[in-house]
Image: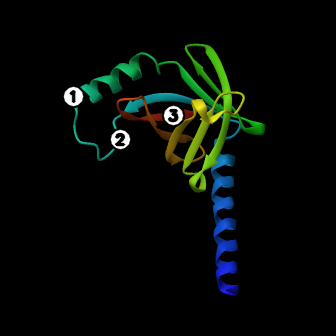
Amino acid sequence: MKHTILFSAAAILLAACNSGKTDALLKHKKWKVYDVTVPAGASYNHVQATQAKDLKDGYYSDAFYQFLDNNLFIATIAGVPDSGKYSLLSNGKIISVTGANGSRSSEHLVEVVKLNENEFDMKVNTGEYYFVLRTRKQ
């Protein structure tokens, strides 16, 4: 029993540390989308590949994301900002983005594919397909 409690406490501490590291890497930076790709390992789909290019050249051509204090999330698309709340799930591997009131009725889940001081790649779902948004720190 004692070992189970210690193992559980260690697992919780490790999860908190990884979420904290993800949060620290995300925060107080302006992440600009520079590419939109099909996720690695996905089977080739001409429509999905075409949509990735169209999204890169269109909707995401002027897109920025910011993660700030108090779990504030700001997305700026074509110069128009929109804000919401974010929280880290699954040991910092998933980001939950909700409306400004924090309601999960409009929740979007984003998978962290790559994250370091200068690069943040995230897997997003557009309804029909998944795409990887590749961003760089500005």
Report which residue position mark 3 lands on. 135
User: In the rendering, at what x and y percent does residue 53 appear?
Assistant: 33, 23
* Residue at image point 35% right, 29% down: 128
- Label 3 environment density (alpha carbons within 10 Å; few <14, some 14–19, many ≥20): many
Give the CA separation, mark 2 to mark 3.
14 Å
- Crowding around mark 1 (Cα neighbors within 10 Å: few <14, some 14 to 19, many 20+) is few
Instruction: Report the residue marked by disc 2.
Output: 39
Identity of the residue drawn at 28% across and 23% down: 50
The quarter of the displayed image where residue 126 is located: top left
**Among numbered discs 2 and 3, the one appearing first in the sequence:** 2
Between 137 and 113, the residue placed more toward the observer is 113
| Secondary structure at numbered mark 1 | helix
Residue named by callout 1: 46
Q: Which residue is located at x 28 percent, y 29 percent?
A: 49
Q: Position of residue 88 (x, y in %)?
A: 63, 47
Residue type beneath disc 1: His
